[in-house]
Amino acid sequence: MKNKALSALSQWVRENKKIAFVVALGIIGMVLIFVSGLDPGEKKESAEAAVSRETYEQEVEQRLKRLIESIEGAGKAEIMIVFESSQESVFARDLSEDVEEAQKDNSRKTEDKYVIVENNGSESGLLTKAVYPKVSGVAVCCDGASDSVIRQRIIETVSALFDINSTNISVVRRAG
């Protein structure tokens, strides 16, 4: 009985290779989706998990401060960064089209909705990416700013990091 079923299945697969291939891909896809949902170590980012603007700005300033202080001759530094805009959140959207209605009256009827997920009893949009604000200006106060070579190195470093014009970067000597 078992051999009969296997031979019938193998004969069907040989006769319908394209359909069997699509079915096999579908089964593999479902297994992968199921397995990915079992991994507790991977947490999906939600709107609440996104880094706040203030935290992001402070982190960028601290990293730049450490970098400038590591430039030979720069000495102790204080940094202020001006950001162009606020953080932008991009949420997943579901675009569906009513094909039956479109065929009947030659018009396209589409519906665009945000994808909503439930997490611990609360609903929120599914965050696909967070676009952090662009830097528009940087002020640097450091001990070594009176040396024109060090000042130029700092300006070139900041300009390269944030892709901003050198006219938007101010480097001055620190008081004290």
Image (tube, rainbow, N blue to C red):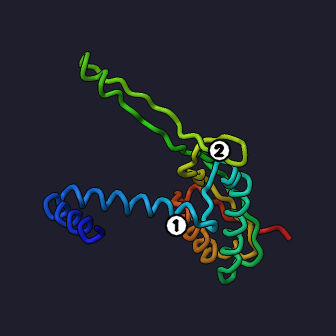
- Mark 2, secondary structure of its residue: strand
- In this view, the residue in front, 31 or 58, is 31
Q: How many marks?
A: 2
Q: How would you rate the neighbour count of disc 2 (Cα within 10 Å): few for under 14, some for 14-19, many for 20 or more? A: few
Identify the amino acid type marked 1: Ala
Which residue, given by chain and number where applicable, does mark 2 sit on? 118
Placement of the N terminus among the 4 image quadrants: bottom left
| 118 relative to 175, above or below | above
Which residue is tagged 1?
Answer: 160
Q: Position of residue 130 (x, y in %)?
A: 57, 51
Residue projecting furthest to the front: 1
Image quadrant assignment for residue 117: top right
Q: Write down the quadrant of residue 170 in the picture.
A: bottom right
**Of 46 and 12, which appears nearest the observer?**
12
Q: Amino acid at mark 2?
A: Glu
Q: Residue at x 15, y 64 (%)?
A: 14
Secondary element at tag 1: helix
Q: Nearer the viewer, mark 1 or mark 2?
A: 2
In the image, which disc is placed on residue 92?
A: none
Tell me if mark 1 has few (under 14), some (14-19) or many (20+) residues whose alpha carbon lies within 10 angstroms of its own: few
Cα–Cα span, label 1 and label 2? 41 Å
Q: In which quadrant is the C terminus drawn?
A: bottom right
Q: Are marks 1 and 2 in contact (CB under 8 Å)?
A: no
